[in-house]
Amino acid sequence: MEKRKIKNTDIEIAPINFGGNVFGWTLDEKQSFEILDKFVEGGFNFIDTADTYAWWVNGVGGQSETIIGNWLKVRNNREKIVIATKVGSQTKEHGYDISRKHILQSVDESLKRLQTDYIDLYYTHFDDDKTPVEETMEAYNEIVKAGKVRHIAVSNVSPARIDESFAVSDKNGYVKYAALQPHYNLLERTKFETQYAPIVEKYNLSVFPYWSLAAGFLTGKYRKEEDFNTARGEGIKKYFNEKGLGILDALDKVAAKHNSQPATIALAWLLANPLITAPIVSATSDRQLQTIFDAPKIKLDSSDIDLLNQASK
């Protein structure tokens, strides 16, 4: 499998990033170990989590990092795995926070849960819209210099604040963001393509889209009204319209052509974009894992991409 490099780093990754929000939520520790083992056996090495996953279950989070840390220790494979985690999200105990105090405390807590002495990629998960950019970037510079974090990245932060972050780093000689994690998929294109793609090109960032399958809608699992009568279904019912059904139809056609599945094609569409380094996607079963494994093998031609682009524009 062709490896891709996280830009501005020496880190090589397989082209799919496993989303660890399911660990401690829809998968218990034993199930999580099984999925992680199979993911790595498939030739993949990049795992994405956050300090607050899954706070919606226990109020504070930490379960995902804890499970990953236990798995790394038992498998004794830390040096073969690329770990991304995040700081700044809310829990029931606190709001969004990227202050120096919170970053310094949170990175140590993440390292303890992950049972490692370094994090490969450390994200600003959410902006708190109040901490001065200088304070945040100085804190990141401090933890990178200390060897706790190899590289930093950014997710839910405005283009203006990202620009400001680079200006502050240039002025002070601080570390700079190496990657962006945006909300981007066939159903959610406009914000990334109009607001963030220019930022990506300007700063030569790697891109790891989250909700690559639109919380499951792009799998084709949701086809009729009653399919949405679940907690997850309710959250994506907004896509059950003419555009959403048109995208599913296009995915079906391309999937049939490649003897594949809609979810695999949706991921292949992302991978065909030269700006995208690796989409983030979760799996809770062998069947879903196979969808992930197949995506880098699919080579969409221009007619496939045109059909998907037209349906999703």
Image (cartoon, rainbow, N blue to C red):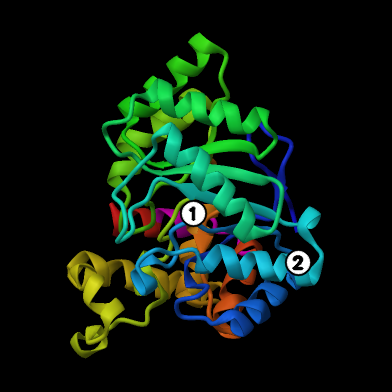
Structural crowding at the residue carrying mark 2, measured as other residues with C-alpha within 10 Å and reported as few (<14), some (14–19) or many (≥20):
some
- Residue bounds of the magenta highlight: 298-306
- Against 146, residue 61 (above or below) is below
Indicate the position of residue 78 as horizontal and vertical percent values.
77, 57
Q: Which mark is residue 73?
A: 2
**Residue found at x 43% / y 64%:** 61
* Residue 16 visible in image: no
Residue at numbered disc 1 = 270
Indicate the position of residue 235 as horizontal and vertical percent values.
24, 71
From this viewpoint, which residue is outermost toward the bottom?
226
Residue nearest the observer in this picture, 94 or 130: 94
Q: Mark 2 is on which residue type?
A: Lys
Q: Is residue 21 magenta?
A: no
> Which quadrant of the figure has residue 231?
bottom left
In this rendering, position of residue 17 left or right of residue 213:
right
In this rendering, position of residue 201 left or right of residue 16:
left
Indicate the position of residue 137 as horizontal and vertical percent values.
48, 26
**Residue found at x 38% / y 52%:** 184
Q: Is mark 1 on a helix, strand or loop?
A: helix
